Amino acid sequence: MGTRLGELTARTPKPLLPVAGAPFLDVLVEEAGRQGFDDIVLLAGHLSPQIEAFVRDSAAAKRRGVSLRLSIEPRPSGTGGAVRCAKEFLADRFVLMNGDSWFDINLRALATKAAGDSNAVMTLALRSMPDVSRYGSVSLVGGKISGFQEKASRAGPGLMNGGIYVCDKEKLLATMKRIAPDETESLSLETQVMPALVADGRLNGEVYDGYFIDIGLTETYAAAQQEIPAHQRRPAVFFDRDGVLNVDSCHVGTIERFHWIEGAIAAIRACNDLGYFTFVVTNQAGVAKGLYQEADVRSVHQYMQETLAAAGAHIDDFRYCPYHVDAVVPEYKKESDWRKPAPGMFHDLVAKWNVDTEHSFCIGDKTTDLDAAAALGLPGYLFEGGDLCGFLLKTPRFSNRRARQPSLSPPC
């Protein structure tokens, strides 16, 4: 209901309050969408017609190709009841997020970690805080959550619930049925389901140190107006493809001929974990030479995304240039400012994403890659083979950024 925000939420659902000119919910849709989550269900109740309008009009959903669906509670039934009401929409394993807070983490990594323990019903993203009195605290022992302490029960540092959960649908619904057999009964995830899972030893936790903000208080909502736009501006890593991410066996145009370079998946995951946009910029003259088609290039890139998702990683966007002055296929026979060393692909990505170029860089295996990056003022690092993740760790811009987040696990 957002009652702590007073008149702000008298006629507007809290997740739809504007932040820097757009509904706050668009922030969450944007972040999930860019990480490859393209099927999002919104659990609504209070002022639900406005949520219905958001489903139709969300700019972030349209920009990222996300399908938005809606589950409306017939009556207020608690956080657990809302999930149970939406059970027909849920995948066997799904990510559940609060609608009034943003915890900037690698969602793919959390999902992959959760999948590694078949006994767990839920895995919670936790954040270390200097003072947990406002949020309540979580006790974590060996990756298992052992208890919760209420808000204001103690001040000082600790872990808090970050409001992002990976859930096993079948196990979660079974737990809910055990606690509240009557599905019309109100049910709370936080005060009923999670404590029951703690008692069963089936509630896991993973600690992340990503940016966190909730908009539940007037002061945090005011802070969000400046903080969120600033944090949405990210540095980027521009990767060449053939010879950097995959073995360059000359015009790789099919999945069968695509083989990852040693350490490439770990390198992309490391960039995701550190909050970089991760882009691929690749010349694909094999299209112009008639060796394969653009659809084949897109198929390879889709295969890359599927492989990365299973490893807790993703690429934010791809650009490729199919043109060449010596093309065999007439429609591709031309000069193009997208073909490296021209910087067109870089310019297009920067125009479409909120890139902090001052802290971005490129990794390529040819001087043409580095020349294209230099046209934007970006440093380029020449990869000459070996372990890509080890190479990434030694690049000055990446190593300097990582040094500011020492709690991150070693990427490779």
Image (spheres, grey):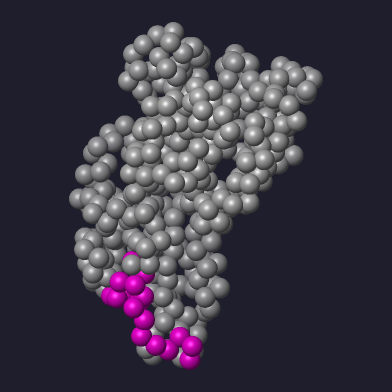
Is residue 334 one of those drawn in magenta? Answer: yes
Q: Residue at x 53, y 53 (%)?
A: 59
Q: Residue at x 41, y 61 (%)?
A: 352
Residue 306 percent location from the top left of the image: 54, 55
The quadrant holding residue 283 is: bottom left
Q: Main secondary structure of the magenta part?
A: loop
Against 315, is 206 above or below?
above
Judging depth in this view, the residue of 109 and 28 nearest the camera is 28
Q: Residue at x 33, y 66 (%)?
A: 346
Residue 74 percent location from the top left of the image: 75, 30
Judging depth in this view, the residue of 211 and 197 nearest the camera is 211
Residue 62 shows in this picture: yes
User: Is 298 positioned to the left or the right of 337 in the image?
Assistant: right
Residue 115 shows in this picture: no
The C terminus lies in quadrant = top left
Judging depth in this view, the residue of 12 and 286 nearest the camera is 12
> Which region shows up in magenta?
330-346
